Amino acid sequence: MNRTLLVTALVVLSAATTLAQTPKVDVFGGYSFVHSDPNGLEPGNAHGWEASLAYNWNSWLGLKADFDGHYCCDQSMYNFLFGPQINLGHGKLTPYLEGLVGASHGNSAGTFSDTVLGFAVGGGADWKLTHRLSWRVAQADLLGTRYNDVTQKNFRFSTGLVFHFGKR
Amino acid sequence: MKRQRMMVLLAFPLLLAVAAVIGCGTLGVDGFLIPVGSQSQVKFAFVVNGNPESDRNSVTVSAYTVNSSTGALTAAPGSPFGTDVSGCCGTVFIDADPTSRFVYVPNGGGGGGEKPEQQQPSPDTVSVFSVDQSTGALTEVSGSPFSSGGSDPFSAKADPSGRFVFVANRGDDTVAAFSVGSNGTLTPAGTVQSITAEPYQMMTDPQSRFLYVTAGGGATIWGFSINSSSGALTPIPGSPFFVPCESRSGTVDFAGHFLVVAVRSCDEVAVYTIDQTTGALSQVNGSPFPTGDRPFHVVEVANGDQTFVAVNNLDDANISVFTFNTSTGALAAVSGSPFTFNNFQWPHYMAADTAGQFGYIVDFSNTITGVTISANGTVTQITGSPFTTGGLSTPTQIVLSH
């Protein structure tokens, strides 16, 4: 009985993690939303976009370059972040975690402009549509910035399409 | 499998549409994406040295750099700086660009005096000074002074975006708007607005949507919408709004939801809800709230999650401190309020680093008291305070820039 269960578990795990081959490069583009934390001022809800390129070193570890832009309230914010993405499987649903750091550039009505430290910690899940295409169902991050030498802890949500290239 | 893919492909644009609708529904002109201006560290302090004596043409502006760690003030080289304010025996109210580019000085009659020799015609101009970003020293910009758009300019107010400046002219009861060029040049914006009372001080909301003007000698507050492109003013429907008694100065809270005004003649502070669409004012439940004798100015300060409102009481020579309910606008006196210090004679004006680090009170003892506020609202002096004004004429106003 125990052996049966073990074999069953292994088969299920294999199906979930798929022995579908890991793509070499994942390119994402889609809609992004930020709920800001402007240190005591009235928070803003900003529309925008996000794009990223992840180079998968192996089946579970990739290196990601992430770019986004958000617009609200006569202000704009662009983030340029880099760091590891940890893939928790490559089955029908591929969850992942990420920890990114880089720069954030903010502009307010043409009178304020600054480039500061930015970072993002979070994760998401991709739903495989075809061999070359997935839907990034949801990605949620704590998006941190350091305007005015104070940390802002913004919330970022993104969704969109992921294109896969190459094979590992 | 194909059906599943189709369902997912169809769900994707649907999810995008839902997200866009939610985002649009919550996206408005409210709020900030990045914190600017008031939340950044204070760099400079500017003090108006008024003139209660009989000398003419001696209203000056002192400039100080602010130590971001200790709050200590250091006078800028060449300070104090002369102005074109004529007459004597009073003051004008200046303002600084929120990002420390310029200081605006209305060159009015300085309050005038009773003696004939103290009367001077107002030049009816506004001087614009550029600020040395290292020392805080002031230099008048090319083309300054500029016409104030009316008679006897008394107060100036820069909007939080730094794009516009507003001038209250008490000689003809008008309020003029100007756009600010990159070199400090003032260009008239829209029509000069007439009000039926002598304008005193002006306040804007953090989002630069609305301008409010207190009227000296009258129990009214005049409200205007600010055109976000030009800076032109349009009266808010329902303006003027009535206050219990004569008001002097005040502030709009960080979120732009409430206007808090010192009601001088009734020894109260009044809190108004700001209609987020029209800018119309209505008093909150419980307002007005009692203060000390002759309240003059209001500042809002945050310390962590707690927000406070402070009011300086001229005749009691102390400061009333309240907790501020950012949802209802209600005020409640903190334990130990009001606060006073040994050097207080007539604490005339206050300014605060709104991030809660430092506050300053100018007093007719020719001192500037530097304070901090704790998480429970207790006000204490910073090291080195009070700072002297070097024996200059009575300091009547202090403004901070970031």
Image (cartoon, coloured by chain):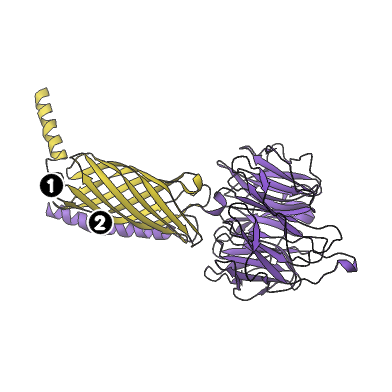
Chain colours: A yellow, B purple
Position of B139 with respect to B17 (left or right) is right
The type of residue carrying mark 2 is Phe
Q: Chain of mark 2?
A: B
Q: How many marks?
A: 2
CA distance for labels 1 and 2? 26 Å
Q: Which mark is residue A167?
A: 1
* Cβ atoms under marks 1 and 2 closer than 8 Å: no
Which residue is the extreme one toward the right? B115
User: Which is nearer the eye, B220 or A24?
Assistant: A24
Estimate how packed mark 1 is, as few (under 14), some (14 to 19) or many (20 or more) residues with alpha carbons within 10 Å: few
Provide the secondary structure element on which disc 2 rests. helix
Q: Residue at x 37, y 49 (%)?
A: A156
Q: Is residue B279 visible?
A: no
In the rendered structure, the answer to whether residue B118 lies left or right of residue A78 reads: right
Q: Nearer the viewer, residue A68 or B27?
A: A68
Q: Percent from the top left, x then y, of residue A119?
A: 38, 45
Q: Quadrant of residue B154?
A: bottom right
Residue at which label 2 appears:
B12
Badge 2: how crowded within 10 Å, few (<14), some, or many (20+)?
some
